[in-house]
Image: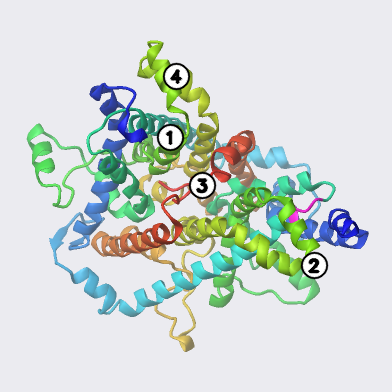
Amino acid sequence: MATRTASARQRRPKTRWLIHLLLIVSCLVVTGPILFALIKATQPTTQVISASLIPGAQLWHNVSNAWVQADLGIYMRNSFIIAFAVTFGKTLFSLMAGMALVYFRIPFKPVVFGFILLTLMMPTQVLIVGLFDLVSKQAPPTWQALFSWIAHPLAPTPYGFNWSNSYWAIIVPFLASATGVFLFRQHFMSIPLSLADAAKIDGAGPLRFLMSILVPMSTNTIGALAVIQFVYVWNQYLWPLVIIRRTDRQVVQVGLNLIISQGQDTDWGLVMAGAIVALIPPLIVFMLLQEQFMRGFALSSEK
Amino acid sequence: MREGTPVFRSRTTAWLLLVPTLVILVIFLYYPAAQSFVLSMYRSNLILGTRKFIGLDNFRELFTGLLAPMYRQVVLQSIVFSAAVVILGLAISMAFAMLANQKVTGARFYRLLLIWPFALSPAIAGTIFSFLFNPQVGAVNHFLRMTLGIAPRWLDNPILAFSLVVGAAIWKELGYNIVFYLAALQNIPGELNEAAAIDGANAWQRFRSVTLPLLSPMTFFLVFTNVAYAFFEVFGLIDILTKGGPVGPSALHLDNAGLTTTMIYRMYQDGFGGTGSLGFAGAQGVVLLFLVAGITVLQFRYGGRNVHYGGGS
């Protein structure tokens, strides 16, 4: 028996090498295409379209060309603004709603919670037809027009927010999150209630309680939600494609396609540089908050 | 019960905390969802701004009219596409995650290499693949020309194009799936497998009767996130790689639409492409809403109550 247990732990060298070999193959499958893009981003234009896979010295040249001439810099700025705004707003609003659902008396609480959860069935991609009118149409010119709009919610949208080509169009609709509210609610319910009672006896109001007890105790959930939301917003494609028509307001994911179709022949070195640059911010966020993400989401039974 | 013993009594504060979330959900999710139903009953044009009530004509057109063969093909393609992405993608991810979970030297390094594409986007995957598989200057055809003397036209041949989109979609999602499978694997106590080994179970038996069942809650979660991914998120990848084309082979009666056109892509084309038929696209949006509702109901029924989409809204 002892020998078998030992063999389970210390495998024969042959098996070990096989595992290493398979692991190297799987790492190549997963990272190969990115590695390829990275190599191509370093090569001079003439070499990019050849079969050569030898790294060149033109990385900075390609990146700065993409950044300035192909507007990558503008796309990146736009993506940064919306990704930070949405991540911050969504986390804050979800935290607030989760707190209300756990620590306050709310009439018809299950109904309110159900009303929030039901939006899991409404992915934005599916709603773009309805959302487009609402976000892009002219604002109601008079109060009367506004009231008549509200009075007839089931007529086709007559007015809207007039937000096409503005950041608001890709920020505001995403500030609420059923996923976020759900995660915070579950997490708060696992915190002993005695803590809240003690805080209250010490004279802490809701805001003090939120800032000095709930937030410090929720770093894993906050980190997990921030990762999920940042990656989600940064990678969004369909809605910006539909609602943003001005290139100087476009996000980087759609911008990549604009860089591909720029000019007669695609400058693939530039495009690969753009793809690598566009991948870096969500990658950094994921790497920085990986621990919290694992503990607050991937390993939780609350998914 | 915790629900019955609220700590704070102020109703005003409670509603102030809830209002931002509720207002945004009502205005930007519930109202547009309802508007999808409303618009689906109109002939509405994006460019002209015209609107005419036509009842259920848009749905008739989708299911029995002239465009019904097109829509049937698109629905079929979406189902085949997501089945391929989910089944192959999860099988590969599970295998890679199990490899990375082995106790070998450098395991941490391998794991890091395998999970970092978590942050990858469909658009970036589409961009890289459209260069890799570019018929003239792509690396894959350079290689095939040198070794086999062939240069397939990846984006013009319908079967190749479909396989390419499936492959790219699977590859993009590998990082995401491996992160979750690795997390689940690391939660499985090592003694379980050791005990099974002592009882004489071989590697395959240990996998079948220990690891696979213990991974099933995670597989269940990933099946649903991957279905949602294959139906909705993959849009950016398709838009960059194939734009929904090329038209399928007529021998198989798949020439009514581009072979890589999924339901969401067709909705985009009809509503915001050349014709701008928002009402017709709205009807497709309604079909998709019912589909999401059906999937969510399945998920809640078979997965208990503690499941939901990761990422998403």
Q: Residue pushed farthest top?
A: A203
Q: Chain of mark 1?
A: A
Q: Position of residue A193 (x, y in %)?
A: 42, 27
Query: Pointer 2: residues within 10 angstroms few (<14), some, or many (20+)?
Result: few
Q: Amino acid at mark 4?
A: Met
Front residue of A267/A2: it is A2
B24 sits to left or right of A194: left
Q: Is residue B225 above or below residue A291?
A: below
Query: Pointer 4: residues within 10 angstroms few (<14), some, or many (20+)?
Result: few
Label 4: which secondary element = helix
**Label 2 belongs to which residue?**
B200
**Label 1 belongs to which residue?**
A189
Q: Position of residue A98 (x, y in %)?
A: 38, 33
Label 3: which secondary element = helix
**Label 3 belongs to which residue?**
A253
Q: Amino acid at mark 3?
A: Gln
**Distance from label 2 to label 1 (Cα)?**
44 Å
- Report the mark closest to the observer, 3 or 4: 4
Q: Quadrant of residue A16?
A: bottom right
Q: Chain of mark 2?
A: B
